[in-house]
Image (cartoon, grey):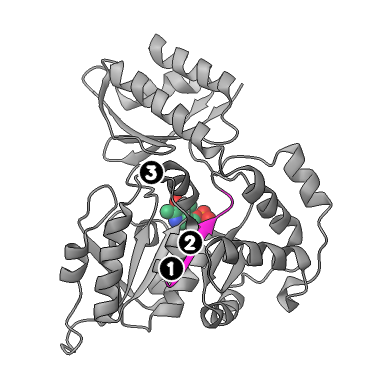
Amino acid sequence: MEINLISDTVTKPSSEMLSAMFSAEVGDDVFKKDPTVNALEEKVASLFGMEAALFFPSGSMVNQTAIKLHTNPGEQLICDKYAHVFNYEGGGVSFNSGVSCRLVDGHRGMMTAEQVEAAINPPDFYHSPLTSLVCIENTTNKGGGACWDFEELKKIKAVCSKHNLAYHLDGARLWNALVRKGENPKQYGELFDTISVCLSKGLGCPVGSVLVGTQTHIKEAIRVRKILGGGMRQAGYLAAAGLFALENNIERLAEDHAKAEEIGKTLTKLNFIKKVEPIETNIIIFELDESKITQEKFMNILEKHAISLIGMGQGKLRLVTHLDYTQEMHKVFLQVLNSI
Ligand SMILES: *Cc1c(COP(=O)(O)O)cnc(C)c1O
């Protein structure tokens, strides 16, 4: 039995999801003639109470498109130092939009409204890049699946309005935050100019992300998506997985969160673990006490049991629970940890 905890992207479509995909009605989505893609886009837009949505092959492409919509070359966006858009999108911010990132030293990937306001360059001071966009991530990836306090997001929105900045949410794992905090997607739709959500993470789809925003933004986003090579043809087969996932796989994220919490409790009790970061959703970040066990040795033991996880650098290790991490795997994993 292989226990893969490197990410919640490792899930494979269930037989129910596959049959939904196989029976999808499709058309050419580049001509907007795929009924299943259109249905998915309408569904996601209405979930967020926003005007329109657009289906994409990846979350990175959604974020990159949103950044392109909100900025001009030479300008600057504000994000936390842990942000996915800065760390894990291949430098796309500069490649695609010619934009730089002003990094904020936040807490677990989250900034305060004061920090955001302090990071804005004065617009009249033409020596510095013009600040045009604030990017938020919820839940935070490198921040260990932390969920934002919605009140802080509102305060940051007020800063954006005051300074005429666009406000984008990288909601690759927003579903996890919604379930954990009992929030409504419409709250987010009211606050942000654009939102990206992933279907290929906790929701268990093989491929797919969605951008949500105004009609005007989405119309422009179709052009940007085309430029980036993201126009897909009979994509309804993939969108069908998304529709299935939205119906069936959101509420169950609570199970992934519960398992993550149990793993955290076990790790905390082990004497060779130096630190476990607070666990709010499905991501567990922890550090080994290298005087008791080296990372190499720890990884070797897990590898022998076909358990995989990833290193985040600086001695941090990450585990992510997901749809395909079964109760049986969970039992085995906890036993292995306790036996080290
Ligand atoms: C996974 C992820 C994305 C998008 O990733 P893709 O692999 O391009 O789909 C964006 N933001 C965050 C925070 C993520 O975790």
Secondary element under disc 1, as helix, strand or loop, is: helix
Question: For the residue marked with disc 1, what is the amino acid?
Answer: Glu
Residue 197 located within the stretch drawn in magenta: yes
The CA distance from mark 1 to mark 2 is 6 Å
Question: For the residue marked with disc 3, what is the amino acid?
Answer: Gly
Q: Residue 328 location in percent, x, y?
A: 58, 19
Q: Which residue is found at the position 35% from the left and 61% from the top?
A: 136
Q: Read off the residue under disc 1.
A: 190
Q: Earlier in the sequence, mark 1 or mark 3?
A: 3
Q: Read off the residue under disc 2.
A: 186
Q: Read off the residue under disc 3.
A: 145
Question: For the residue marked with disc 2, what is the amino acid?
Answer: Lys
The 10 Å Cα crowd at callout 3, few under 14, some 14 to 19, many 20 or more, is many
Would residue 48 be visible to someone looking at this image? yes
Q: Residue 215 location in percent, x, y?
A: 56, 80
Q: Earlier in the sequence, mark 2 or mark 3?
A: 3
Badges 1 and 2: C-beta atoms under 8 Å apart? yes
**Horizontal arrangement in the rendering, residue 146 relative to residue 1 (left or right):** left
The 10 Å Cα crowd at callout 1, few under 14, some 14 to 19, many 20 or more, is few
Taking depth in this image into account, of 161 and 339 the one nearest to the observer is: 161
Q: Which residue is found at the position 47% from the left and 44% from the top?
A: 179
Q: Quadrant of the N terminus?
A: top right
Quarter residue 319 falls in: top left
Q: Which residue is found at the position 39% from the left and 53% from the top?
A: 138
